[in-house]
């Protein structure tokens, strides 16, 4: 199906990001980052440590703002929003899945999944209903009264995914979602994310530094030294991305 402008969820145009240095001046970490993400895509943003991919993720997730350029999320220009406005955007549009799960250790699984719904001001009965529905969706409906410390790493990440889905986002931002898991559990989580994307049309943007993980996506945006060096289908061989690094900035 041909993509249209109406399908664009993320639109980044000439995004630049610099950070001030203690001794004065500033360091630029992103250079003219430009790409779109359409509804229903599964995109991996990939690059080595220090490449700028985490900074790019923070901007996509409305956790930070760019120094220059323009960022639109669902057609809304959020480039210069203040922290309170960005918090509303995050809660309304984005479900987050983090490497370290970010679950509240002393709260039950059900409470953890209900958390984003509390910030939306939903009645308790509605919070419970939706949280239970999401736990069933990830196969953990029998564990709602457990504490996170009683769960395996893979189960914790499923709880985190349920929490991300609770607000009914059209976009999930997954930051190194298998980084704290062994390979078996990691592959299980990646297959689950892939299934969500295929069967429910949820757009997924996944941050990773591993080519094996990026292969679960349909498209790779490779960042190296703050520049996009590759943007296209997942290549069959990582050497394609290595060659793109050597060529430098994508033309």
Image (tube, grey):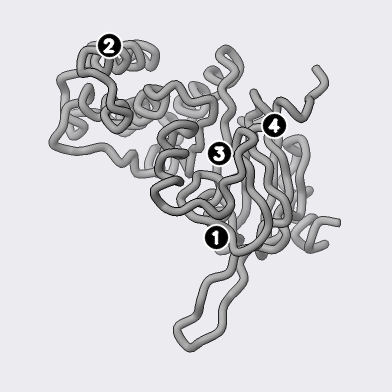
Task: Tell me if 220 is positioned left or right of 105 in this view.
Answer: right
- Badge 1 density bin: few <14, some 14–19, many ≥20, Cα 10 Å: few
Q: Residue at x 51, y 76 (%)?
A: 20
Mark 4 highlights which residue? Answer: 8
Q: Secondary structure at mark 3?
A: strand
Task: Tell me if 246 is positioned left or right of 57 in this view.
Answer: right
- How many angstroms separate mark 4 from mark 1 (CA)? 28 Å
Mark 1 highlights which residue? Answer: 49
- Badge 3 density bin: few <14, some 14–19, many ≥20, Cα 10 Å: many
Q: Secondary structure at mark 4?
A: strand
Mark 2 highlights which residue? Answer: 129
- How many angstroms separate mark 3 from mark 4 (CA)? 17 Å
User: Where 30 sits versus 175, above or below?
Assistant: below
Indicate which disc, 3 or 1, sits on the residue closer to the N terminus: 1
For residue 49, which quarter of the picture? bottom right
- Badge 2 density bin: few <14, some 14–19, many ≥20, Cα 10 Å: few
- Are circles 3 and 4 on residues that touch, CB within 8 Å? no
Seen as rendered, the residue at the extreme bottom is 23
Q: Residue at x 58, y 36 (%)?
A: 205
The percent coordinates of residue 61 (x first, y second) are: 50, 44
Mark 3 highlights which residue? Answer: 206
């Amino acid at each position: 199906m041909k993509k249209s402008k109406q399908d664009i969820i993320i639109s980044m145009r000439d995004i630049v990001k610099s950070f001030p240095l203690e001794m004065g001046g500033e360091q630029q970490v992103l250079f003219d980052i430009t790409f779109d993400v359409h509804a229903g895509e599964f995109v991996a943003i990939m690059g080595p440590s220090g490449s700028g991919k985490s900074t790019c993720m923070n901007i996509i997730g409305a956790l930070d703002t760019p120094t220059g350029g323009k960022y639109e999320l669902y057609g809304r220009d959020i480039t210069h929003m203040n922290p309170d406005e960005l918090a509303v955007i995050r809660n309304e549009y984005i479900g987050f899945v983090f490497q370290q799960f970010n679950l509240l250790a002393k709260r039950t699984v059900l409470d953890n999944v209900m958390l984003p719904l509390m910030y939306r001001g939903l009645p308790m009965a509605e919070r419970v209903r939706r949280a239970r529905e999401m736990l069933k969706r990830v196969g953990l409906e029998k564990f709602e009264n457990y504490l996170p410390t009683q769960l395996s790493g893979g189960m914790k990440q499923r709880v985190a995914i349920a929490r991300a889905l609770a607000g009914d986002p059209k976009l999930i931002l997954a930051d190194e979602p298998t980084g704290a898991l062994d390979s078996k559990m990691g592959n299980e989580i990646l297959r689950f994310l892939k299934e969500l994307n295929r069967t429910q049309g949820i757009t997924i943007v996944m941050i990773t530094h591993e080519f094996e993980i990026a292969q679960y996506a349909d498209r790779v945006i490779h960042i190296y030294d703050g520049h996009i060096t590759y943007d296209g289908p997942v290549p069959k061989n990582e050497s394609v991305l290595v060659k793109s690094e050597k060529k430098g900035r994508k033309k």
